[in-house]
């Protein structure tokens, strides 16, 4: 049996940028045929639910995505160097996939106090509505009966509870074109955005505390587009604003916050809104998992599919061996020791 490091390296060496998960999904299916019965293997496109859906014990799901962000030009080839695994997806989240696969092979599933499912899916790194989890849930509605989902996103080995919601808004500013030598004959759409951009730059993060955990609401301009020539006053300018909002706030309330900022100074078009994930520290299984890590629970200051499970009425948390600071980085890496530590925690937790 390969070590966790060797297994993770094998997964990292097989590219699976978003939209191109097929080869990795085929590898997962070939592996699953060796470790699960035919009735336990459910594939939808390049996503899977593995395990017994009819088991009457409380069910816990280990959740991981197969895709990575696109590769960075000039990145080094995947390799091991001492205690570090280098390569795209090592922290986010093929190291976690290696842990999940090792647990599937080595846990005495029939004698555990809980039933365990493995949920592996495509297109997590893209728009909310394109994720492979949606079609998977439609085909396997038993996922709605989970007692706990563990999304194995990078958390530096801590249990991170809840998650901030995320929405994108395109702010469109209209002007009138003119020769840049005579700007008074037009209206500069880029200049029209100055007030909103100044207020965004001055906006402080907003702390929201739930069950002793602090989340921060932040609003940032992330893309800008406008102008058609160096000597033309632009008649149109667009800014993309990304708003991260705390658990307990609905998408509709978050949209109202953006409208309050712009105050009809531009046209607002909302896109790719993803809900926040609820805090579920009262779940006894969550308390046991936190205890198994030996660390205090933390707030998840990012969006993850914990939010999607919350929408389905399922308690879910984030816990994985990856390093948050390494996710999406050029020459991404993770600690091999962290892979083993994550395995040990989950093994102890699932054995009860």
Image (cartoon, rainbow, N blue to C red):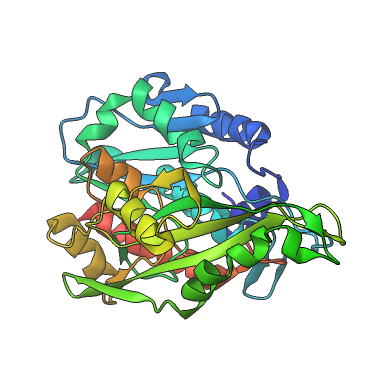
Identified at 64% across, 36% down, the residue is 19
Measured from the top left, where is residue 253 in percent x and y? 27, 53
Residue 94, compared with residue 198, is above or below; it is above
Work out whether residue 164 can be spotted. Answer: no
Query: Does 181 sit left or right of 112 as displayed?
Result: right
* Occupied quadrant, residue 319: bottom left
Measured from the top left, where is residue 92 in percent x and y? 55, 57
Seen from the viewer's position, the closer of residues 34 and 324 is: 324
Measured from the top left, where is residue 56 in percent x and y? 15, 31
Identified at 39% across, 58% down, the residue is 258
Seen from the viewer's position, the closer of residues 70 and 65 is: 70
Seen from the viewer's position, the closer of residues 177 and 225 is: 177
Seen from the viewer's position, the closer of residues 127 and 326 is: 127
Identified at 72% across, 50% down, the residue is 13
Measured from the top left, where is residue 212 in percent x and y? 18, 75
Identified at 56% across, 49% down, the residue is 1
* Occupied quadrant, residue 344: bottom left
Query: Does 264 sit left or right of 352 as displayed?
Result: right
């Amino acid at each position: 049996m390969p070590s966790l490091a060797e297994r993770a390296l094998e997964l990292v060496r097989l590219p699976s940028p978003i939209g191109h998960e097929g080869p990795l999904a085929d590898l997962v299916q070939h592996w699953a045929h060796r470790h699960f019965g035919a009735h336990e293997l459910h594939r939808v496109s390049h996503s899977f639910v593995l395990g017994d859906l009819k088991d009457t014990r409380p069910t816990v799901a280990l959740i991981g995505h197969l895709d990575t962000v696109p590769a960075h030009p000039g990145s080094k080839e995947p390799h091991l160097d001492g205690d570090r695994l280098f390569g795209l997806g090592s922290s986010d989240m093929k190291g976690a996939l290696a842990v999940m696969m090792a647990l599937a092979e080595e846990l005495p599933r029939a004698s555990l106090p809980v039933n365990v499912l493995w949920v592996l899916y495509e297109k997590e790194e893209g728009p909310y509505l394109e994720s492979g989890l949606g079609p998977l849930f439609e085909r396997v509605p038993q996922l709605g009966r989970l007692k706990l989902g563990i999304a194995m996103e990078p958390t530096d080995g801590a249990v991170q509870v809840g998650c901030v919601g995320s929405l994108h808004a395109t702010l469109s500013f209209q002007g009138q074109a003119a020769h840049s030598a005579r700007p008074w004959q037009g209206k500069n759409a880029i200049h029209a955005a100055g007030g909103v951009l100044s207020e965004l730059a001055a906006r402080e993060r907003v702390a929201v505390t739930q069950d002793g955990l602090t989340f921060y609401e932040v609003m940032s301009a992330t893309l800008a587009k406008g102008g058609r020539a160096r000597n033309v006053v632009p008649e149109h300018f667009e800014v993309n604003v990304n708003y991260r909002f705390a658990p307990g706030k609905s998408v509709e309330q978050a949209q109202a916050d953006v409208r309050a900022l712009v105050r009809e100074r531009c046209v607002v078009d909302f896109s790719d809104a993803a809900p926040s994930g609820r805090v579920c520290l009262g779940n006894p299984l969550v308390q046991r998992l936190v205890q198994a890590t030996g660390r205090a629970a933390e707030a998840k200051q990012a969006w993850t599919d914990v939010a999607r499970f919350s929408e389905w009425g399922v308690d879910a948390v984030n816990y994985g061996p990856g390093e948050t600071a390494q996710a999406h980085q050029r020459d991404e890496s993770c600690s091999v020791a962290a892979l083993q530590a994550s395995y040990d925690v989950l093994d102890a937790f699932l054995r009860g």
